[in-house]
Image: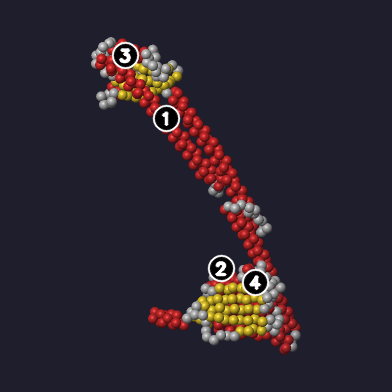
Amino acid sequence: MAKKRKSIATRWFINSFGVVAVIMLVITVSVFLTARTYYYNAVSMYLRSEANIVSGVLTGFYEGSSSNYADEVRDAVELFDEKDKMELMAIDRHGRISLSSSGFSPDAETEMPDYEAAMSEDGDGTGQYIGKLDRGDASEKYMAVTVAVEAGNSDYSAIRVMTGLERVDAHIAQLVLMTAVAGFFVLLLVLFLDLYFVQSILRPIRIMADSSKKLAKGDFSERINADRDDEIGELCTAFNYMANELQDSEAMKNDFISSVSHELRTPLTAIKGWSETIMEVHDRETLKKGMRVITDETQRLSDMVEELLDFSRIQNNRLTLQKANMDVLAELADAVLIYTERAAQNDIIINFHEPEGIAMIYGDKNRMRQVFINIIDNSVKYIGRDGVIGIDVHFTDSEVEIKIADNGCGISPEDLPKVKNRFYKANNTVRGSGIGLAVADEIVTRHSGKLEIESEKGQGTTVTITLPTITIESMKAAENSSALQQ
């Protein structure tokens, strides 16, 4: 069963909108708890203050004993100034409410935990309680504060002040509601911003996904409008660059297939034609000429196949080098010698003055000779008749620089950066597979060297190969080290 895909929009909604929702919920709860604590403490302090004032007045009457204490308590309760805001009660020594500023006698079974706390021996003479008072079908939330008074022979033991909390709770609810409404609009704003932001990301991604499918099917003309200056714009630019490269690679591959097909067909046609001629003609000169053509074309096919195999090995990272200490100038001289006669047949002059001394490198002599042959062969192919190829060598203790220059047709500025790419041919009228320079560049790179090409259209081309050299002293030291190890 396929795993259900979770979209970026869903993950963004959970990670962004969900977090903001939790934060707003925490803020709302915090506002509720903070407001409730603040307002309830304010009510508690107000009740305690009024209870302490009444208690102090009654205590003064009791100590003075100049009048009837019971009458003073009654007057204090009945004439209570704040009766419109709270209710004042007098509690007798049996714990029952005997007087009330409201004129109503509460139920005798009414619980008064605040009174019990005030009368407790462990307390400070003050108790507080928040509860609900049943009034028929409804209940009213209230807060009560009880303060013990000097009893003596009096029938009264405590003063209780009580007030309803509906207005306080309504104010708290209003604050919480305002916070919740503000949180709702914040969440709504976050939702719209998230939807806009996510869509601004998903839209080009979806376009790229559709375009990628078209690329996979071979439509390399697909491009994306990269008019943004952010990371998405960079991604679109990278996609367009990839599409351009794929299109160029596809074009070069098609040119390569066409070129190789042509290169294979030409020698095969020659071999087939001369084979048929040899079978029908028994003239010795014709036979020798035909066999020479067949041998040359067979060698040409063999070289082409070997070049293709080398390229395949490079692509699969299986190109191996048999490295040893070697004189790179000797391999260069051999390559020049191989092409001297062929160049002379085309009236091409190769100017090479072999320098004195040796330039030792650590490398594969056969591969380095292949590099020189490849480059000289390119010069011969593109230079035409009556051309000149100049080969100069400069070397120091650290490197050797070999320049192979010709006065051929040259390479245009737009083609020059691509001539070392695989399958690329700047001139399709000249035979070749288009991978020789790519192979040569890879071989030089694997010898820790550089292959650079300078050219100007109509003015010729110069190929510079730079390789690190090794000194005689280092060679001797390596030989001595090897001898000691043996």
Observer-side mark, 1 or 2, equals 1
Count of number-bearing discs = 4
- Neighbour tally class for label 1: few under 14, some 14-19, many 20 plus, Cα within 10 Å: some
In primary-sequence order, the first of circles 2 and 3 is 3
What's the residue at 55%, 82% (across, down)?
Answer: 329
Point out the residue furthest to the left here: 152
How far apart in space, not on screen, are marks 1 and 4 (Cα)?
84 Å
* Amino acid type shown at disc 2: Asn
In primary-sequence order, the first of circles 1 and 3 is 1
**Circle 4 sits on which residue?**
434
* Amino acid type shown at disc 1: Arg
**Circle 3 sits on which residue?**
73
- Residue 36, label in figure: 1
* Amino acid type shown at disc 4: Gly
Q: Position of residue 462 (x, y in %)?
A: 62, 76
- Neighbour tally class for label 4: few under 14, some 14-19, many 20 plus, Cα within 10 Å: many
| Mark 1 and mark 3 residues within 8 Å of each other at the beta carbon | no
In primary-sequence order, the first of circles 1 and 2 is 1
Give the quadrant of residue 268.
bottom right
